[in-house]
Image (cartoon, rainbow, N blue to C red):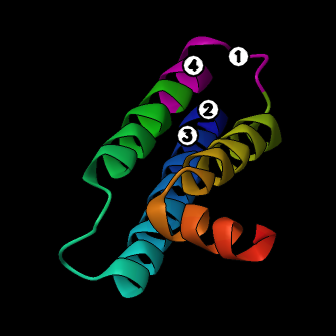
């Protein structure tokens, strides 16, 4: 029962963060520049982390949540609005 509850919490966190990412990207770029590739990579990464959590019992819930949060930040760094903001910050 504990394993199912932890997996449910992890899936809920992944869905929440993915929805937040897609809302932020949509509000920053609009219809024309939405990064579908980054969004797909985020979904696939979430599925991989959930499958690893289900396969390995010694993987803590906090480790899985932390790794997905860091993965989301890494994916967000390579989107067009962030790259444009970094370009204007540097120059």
Q: Earlier in the sequence, mark 4 or mark 2?
A: 2
Question: Which residue is painted at 46% across and 62% down in the image?
Answer: 80
- Badge 2 marks a residue whose secondary structure is helix
Q: Earlier in the sequence, mark 3 or mark 4?
A: 3
| Pair 4/2: label in front | 4
Percent coordinates x, y for residue 51 in the rendering: 48, 22
| Prevailing secondary structure class for the magenta stretch in the rendered image | helix
Q: Which mark is residue 57?
A: 1
Relative to 39, is 89 on the left or the right? right
Asked whether disc 3 touches disc 1, contact meaning CB atoms under 8 Å apart, the reply is no
Q: Residues within 10 Å of mark 1 (few under 14, many from 20)?
A: few
Residue 23 within the magenta-colored segment of the rendering: no
| Pair 2/3: label in front | 3
Q: Which residues are magenta?
A: 50-59
Question: Which residue is painted at 79% across and 16% down in the image?
Answer: 58
Question: Which residue is painted at 48% across and 33% down in the image?
Answer: 45
Asked whether disc 3 touches disc 4, contact meaning CB atoms under 8 Å apart, the reply is no
Distance between mark 3 and mark 1 Cα atoms: 11 Å
- Badge 1 marks a residue whose secondary structure is loop
Question: Which residue is painted at 66% across and 37% down in the image?
Answer: 2
Distance between mark 1 and mark 2 Cα atoms: 8 Å
Q: Which mark is residue 3?
A: 2
Q: Residues within 10 Å of mark 3 (few under 14, many from 20)?
A: some
Residue position marked by numbered label 4 in the rendering: 52
Residue position marked by numbered label 3 in the rendering: 7
Relative to 77, is 43 on the left or the right? left
- Badge 4 marks a residue whose secondary structure is helix
* Residue 85 vertical position relative to residue 50 in the rendered view, above or below: below
- Badge 3 marks a residue whose secondary structure is helix
Asked whether disc 2 touches disc 3, contact meaning CB atoms under 8 Å apart, the reply is yes
């Amino acid at each position: 029962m504990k394993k199912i509850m932890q997996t449910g919490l992890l899936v809920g966190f992944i869905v929440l963060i993915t929805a937040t990412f897609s809302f932020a990207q949509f509000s920053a770029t609009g219809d024309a520049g939405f990064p579908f590739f980054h969004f797909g990579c985020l979904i696939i990464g979430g599925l991989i982390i959930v499958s690893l959590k289900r396969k390995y019992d010694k993987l803590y819930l906090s480790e899985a949540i932390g790794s997905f949060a860091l993965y989301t930040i890494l994916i967000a760094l390579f989107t067009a609005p962030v790259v444009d903001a970094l370009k204007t910050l540097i120059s």
